[in-house]
């Protein structure tokens, strides 16, 4: 069987993974850092309303879903470069974060998540108690 090779096929496949398609948009760009006793995550989701964003936590996986709906009117499209549809991203978070107290705020197209460090993961001092040697007790048989 003769197979024709297309040198641009892999480039096209890679571009779809990185930039997405209209049916499957690219992932949301993200920054993350630790600020004191909080882990902060910012995701760019421009053009999405706050009502169009869903956050779900299951075990230690935080799932972010957002939807930028398509145009519903009868207008003629001249250019369509902004991806539409459902965007999603999953963050696998360590046990050292308190996923019961996640705070989310959305402003100017940026979703900011603030995840507190769990109390059990915070550094703490352990007091050392001095044991004074007592005379050994005799064992009787």
Image (cartoon, rainbow, N blue to C red):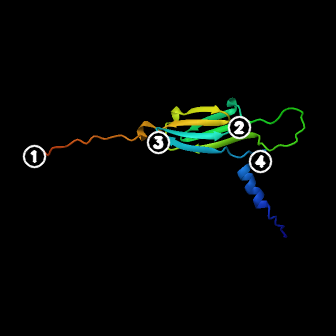
Category of crowding for the residue at label 1, using alpha-carbon neighbours closer than 10 angstroms: few (below 14), some (14–19), many (at least 20): few
Whether residues under marks 2 and 3 lie with C-beta atoms below 8 angstroms apart, the answer is no
Q: Which residue is drawn at 78% across and 57% down?
A: 12
Q: Which of marks 2 and 3 is in front?
A: 2
Q: Is mark 1 on a helix, strand or loop?
A: loop
- Which mark is drawn over residue 135? 1
In the image, what residue occupies the spot 60% across and 36% down?
Answer: 112
Mark number, residue 106? none
Q: Position of residue 114 (x, y in %)?
A: 54, 36
Q: Residues within 10 Å of mark 3 (few under 14, many from 20)?
A: some
Label 2 sits on residue: 46
Closer to us: 92 or 74: 74
Q: Is residue 16 above or below residue 88?
A: below
| Mark with earlier residue (2, 3) | 2
**Comparing labels 1 and 2, the label whose residue is closer to the camera:** 2
Task: Tell me which residue sits at (20%, 43%) in the image.
Answer: 130
Q: Name the residue under label 4.
A: 21
> For numbered disc 3, what is the local secondary structure?
loop
Q: Is residue 85 left or right of residue 1?
A: left
- Residue assigned mark 3: 96
Count residues near mark 2 (Cα–Cα under 10 Å), then give few for <14, some for 14-19, many for 20+.
some
Quadrant housing residue 118: top left
**Do the residues under discs 1 and 4 have CB atoms within 8 angstroms?**
no
Marks 4 and 3, the one that precedes in the sequence: 4
- The Cα atoms of the two marked residues, 1 and 2, are separated by 74 Å
The x, y position of residue 128, in whole percent, is: 25, 42
């Amino acid at each position: 069987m003769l197979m024709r090779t297309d040198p641009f096929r892999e480039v096209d496949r890679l571009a779809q993974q990185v930039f997405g398609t209209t049916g499957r948009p690219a992932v949301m760009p993200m920054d993350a850092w630790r600020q004191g006793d909080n882990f902060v995550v910012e995701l760019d989701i421009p053009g999405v309303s706050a009502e169009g964003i869903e956050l779900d936590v299951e075990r230690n996986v935080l799932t972010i879903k957002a939807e930028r709906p398509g145009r519903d009117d009868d207008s003629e499209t001249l250019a369509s470069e902004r991806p539409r549809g459902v965007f999603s991203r999953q963050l696998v978070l360590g046990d050292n974060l308190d996923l019961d107290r996640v705070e989310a705020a959305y402003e100017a197209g940026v979703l900011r998540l603030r995840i507190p460090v769990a109390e059990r993961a915070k550094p703490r001092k352990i007091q050392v108690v001095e044991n004074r040697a007592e005379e050994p007790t005799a064992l009787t048989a």
